[in-house]
Image (cartoon, rainbow, N blue to C red):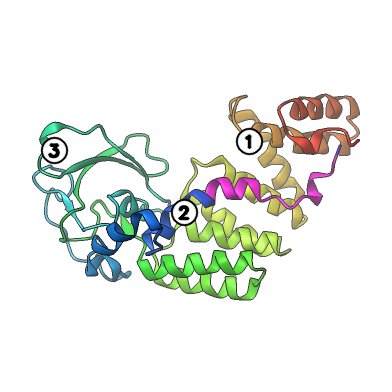
Amino acid sequence: MKTAARRIRKSLELKVIVGIVALLAACSGTRSGGDEALTEHAVDCPATQALTLQSCTAQLPVGYGSLPSKPLEWGATRAGALYFGRLVCPNGGLAMTERAETRPELSAEGTEAWEVRCPGDPTPRTWYATPRRCGNPCPPDGLRVIAQPALQRYLASVAAFEAADIQLALQRIDEAVALAPPNELLTLWKGTMLEQSGRPLEAVPYYEAAVRMNPDEPAHKLFLARAQRAAGHEPPYRAAIDDLLAKLPTGHPLVPELQCLKAELLNKDGKTAEAHALAATACQAGHADCCPER
């Protein structure tokens, strides 16, 4: 059985982060050939581009965004997904959004319906939006929008990290944090960089913050557990692995890795038969670290 502690684990972080990176790259102004003309002529309103922490402090109109007659107005590139991809909930978690079923009466007016849900909130709220007009770019209900300058520095941090310039990557993410409301995306990315550059003890508080911001995401808890183990904090690591295995359904994509990590702990505790059985289960589920070396 391979030792999972020796792995450079990027796959889980990529699942959580890369999709957001692709979305926000478009949001920051990156253009592809097929969309170049559309992007150039349908850019964000100046007010949306210049959003800062101080931009949305004024009280919004009553019913703003919650009624088709009072839709959100911001003027976005390539439809509203880019704007909604930047929403930060009051506790710092990124809002989970989905385009609602289009209704004929809304389409005729160029208005879209979106379902918006904050982490920890079981019930989504419906927002109405008109991304084809330039108006008030601020979201209702205490949410914030990540500023474009912060997104640009975040993407610069990702690029620097991929180029192995850790110092520049950390500098850029600190600049992004200074320009944005505290949020899950930037916090998780800084923790990831610190852990993967051999500084797990420094990564722990960032992962803890990401868990608080989005308690619905079990991957954040696994990232935290791994950093705690690497930092020598084995009791909370053990507790986290047991808790996640107890709560996640059998078919959850994290379960095979969790089983493999648990098998390591069982083997360490001298429970060899249990360890081998669990490792075999993880291997059969496709987690190669628990497969016998050949």
Where's residue 235, x and y in %? 74, 46
Of tags 2 and 1, which is closer to the observer? 2
Label annotation for residue 22: 2
Label annotation for residue 106: 3
Where's residue 243, x and y in %? 64, 35
Left or right: 173 with respect to 27?
right
Question: Mark 1 — residue?
Answer: 254
The reply to whether the magenta stretch includes residue 6 is: yes
Question: Taking 285 as reference, is 43 above or below it?
Answer: below
Tell me the residue at 44%/73% (across/down): 178
Q: CA distance from mark 2 to mark 1?
A: 23 Å
Please, what secondary structure does the residue beneath circle 1 have?
loop
User: Which image quadrant: the C terminus?
Assistant: top right
Of tags 1 and 3, which is closer to the observer? 3
Give the magenta-colored segment's residue range. Answer: 2-17
Q: CA distance from mark 1 to mark 3?
A: 40 Å
